Image (tube, rainbow, N blue to C red):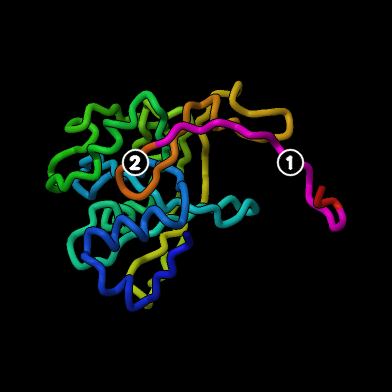
């Protein structure tokens, strides 16, 4: 039986219940670790479920940060250094990735605290997650403050990618299932990917 939930119902819910409901009801999201480095040289990594595709030409991705009502190390590091990385979370280390959501102080490296390995390239200053099968290096481009709830959309331009060539098809398609990528439901439930099939380019009259 379908249940109707009004806005008043949602706003009247217990805070924890409302958070769980609204974080899961929109469906599965990608699980990514965002790597940054502070102005003092401390590497930071934190898990996010809000990474979105912005465009392919130029290649841009974005992610949403919660309001700056408390210090946000990821935000301040990106603003200070101008670079960050996005690293796909895989089944082999999702538990360690989840632990990065804990509130460590700014002098503590989540890499070390959570058992993850920072990886650097000569052309990109922010740390990658060595364990990740798909890594993207980005340069900060712009930010957009969302007045509806005080969150911030950070947009970055992809300047390099680190990926096993065996994961990329002849047409450029990246096989996330072969990479062991996981998705996240809400804030704490992780799922493995299982491909159902690739569909042809949709055109009118081809609904069958």
On screen, residue 57 versus residue 71, left or right, reads right
Q: Which mark is residue 102?
A: none
Judged from the image, the secondary structure of the residue bearing numbered disc 2 is strand
Q: Give 44 or 171, whichever is nearer the viewer.
A: 171
Tell me which residue sits at (59%, 26%) in the image.
Answer: 167
Residue 123 image offset from top left, x and y in percent: 45, 37
Q: Which residue is mark 1?
A: 199
| Magenta-drawn stretch contains 144 | no
Tell me which residue sits at (74%, 41%) in the image.
Answer: 199
Residue 8 image offset from top left, x and y in percent: 33, 78
Residue extending farthest to the top is 166
Residue 106 image offset from top left, x and y in percent: 15, 48
Tell me which residue sits at (46%, 47%) in the image.
Answer: 28
Tell me which residue sits at (39%, 49%) in the image.
Answer: 49
Category of crowding for the residue at label 2, using alpha-carbon neighbours closer than 10 angstroms: few (below 14), some (14–19), many (at least 20): few
Q: Calculate the distance from the C-alpha at mark 1 to the C-alpha at mark 2.
A: 28 Å
Name which of mark 1 and mark 2 comes first in the sequence: 2
Question: Where 25 sits versus 12, above or below?
Answer: above
| Magenta-drawn stretch contains 196 | yes
Q: Give 74 or 4, whichever is nearer the viewer.
A: 4
Provide the residue span drawn in magenta: 191-205
Residue 84 can be seen in this image: yes
Q: Give 8 or 189, whichever is nearer the viewer.
A: 8
Residue extending farthest to the front is 1
On screen, residue 183 versus residue 79, left or right, reads right
Q: Which mark is residue 189?
A: 2
Residue 156 can be seen in this image: no
Category of crowding for the residue at label 1, using alpha-carbon neighbours closer than 10 angstroms: few (below 14), some (14–19), many (at least 20): few
What secondary structure prevails in the magenta region? loop
């Amino acid at each position: 039986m379908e249940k109707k939930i009004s806005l008043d119902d949602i706003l009247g819910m217990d805070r924890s219940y409302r958070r769980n409901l609204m974080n899961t009801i929109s469906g599965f999201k990608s699980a990514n670790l965002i790597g940054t480095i502070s102005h003092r040289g401390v590497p930071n990594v934190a898990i996010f479920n809000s990474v979105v595709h912005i465009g392919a030409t130029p290649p841009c991705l974005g992610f949403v940060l919660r309001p700056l009502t408390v210090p946000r190390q990821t935000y301040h590091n990106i603003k200070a250094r101008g670079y960050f990385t996005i690293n796909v979370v895989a089944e082999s280390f999702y538990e360690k990735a989840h632990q990065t959501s804990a509130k460590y102080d700014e002098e503590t490296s989540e890499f070390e605290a959570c058992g993850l390995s920072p990886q650097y390239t000569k052309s990109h200053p922010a740390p990658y997650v060595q364990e990740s099968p798909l890594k993207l290096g980005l340069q900060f481009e712009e930010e957009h403050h969302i007045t509806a709830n005080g969150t911030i959309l950070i947009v970055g331009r992809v300047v390099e990618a680190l990926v096993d060539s065996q994961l990329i098809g002849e047409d450029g398609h990246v096989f996330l299932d072969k990479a062991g990528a996981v998705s996240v439901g809400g804030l704490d439930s992780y799922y493995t990917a299982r491909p159902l099939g690739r569909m042809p380019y949709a055109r009118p009259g081809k609904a069958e």
